[in-house]
Image (cartoon, rainbow, N blue to C red):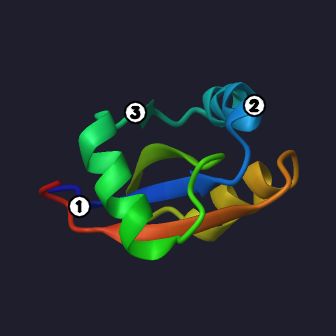
Amino acid sequence: MKHSKQYLVVLHKTDELQAAKTKLSELGYEYASMDDAKKEMILSERFSDNDELTVLVIKVDDNVDAKKIFAQIESIVSEIEVIEFPAEV
């Protein structure tokens, strides 16, 4: 059975969201958005100024080096934060 981890990728500029989604699609990864209430809760817990922040949820199989995926995203956007999330979320 395959195991996967779920990550929240926090983008610091909302206008970079589409570029990040495109890059993920090119790499063959699925992403999901998160409902606004949950997103707000997570962002407000971790960041004091979260006006410009937005979130992508990415599932990565355990046998994949997730850091490489994040490096690819980071190469096209100004700044990201990656938060590992419990799989059941």
| Residue type at the position of mark 3 | Ser
Location of residue 66 in the rendering, given as x and y in whole percent from the top left corner: 55, 64
Instruction: Tell whether label 2 touches label 3 (CB within 8 Å).
Output: no
Q: Nearer the viewer, residue 73 or 35?
A: 35
> Disc 3 vs disc 2: which is toward the camera?
2
Quarter of the image for the N terminus: give it: bottom left
- Mark 1 and mark 2: Cα distance apart in space: 32 Å
Q: Give the vertical position of 35 relative to 74 (above or below).
A: above
Which residue is disc 3 drawn over?
33
Q: Residue at x 56, y 56 (%)?
A: 50
Location of residue 39 in the rendering, given as x and y in whole percent from the top left corner: 35, 48
| Residue type at the position of mark 1 | His
Q: Give the vertical position of 79 relative to 55 (above or below).
A: below
- Mark 1 and mark 3: Cα distance apart in space: 21 Å
Location of residue 69 in the rendering, given as x and y in whole percent from the top left corner: 65, 55
- Mark 3 and mark 2: Cα distance apart in space: 15 Å
Q: Give the vertical position of 40 relative to 18 (above or below).
A: below
Rendered image: mark on residue 15: 2
Q: Is the residue marked by circle 2 packed among few (<14), some (14-19), or many (20+) residues within 10 Å?
A: few
Secondary-structure class at tag 3: loop
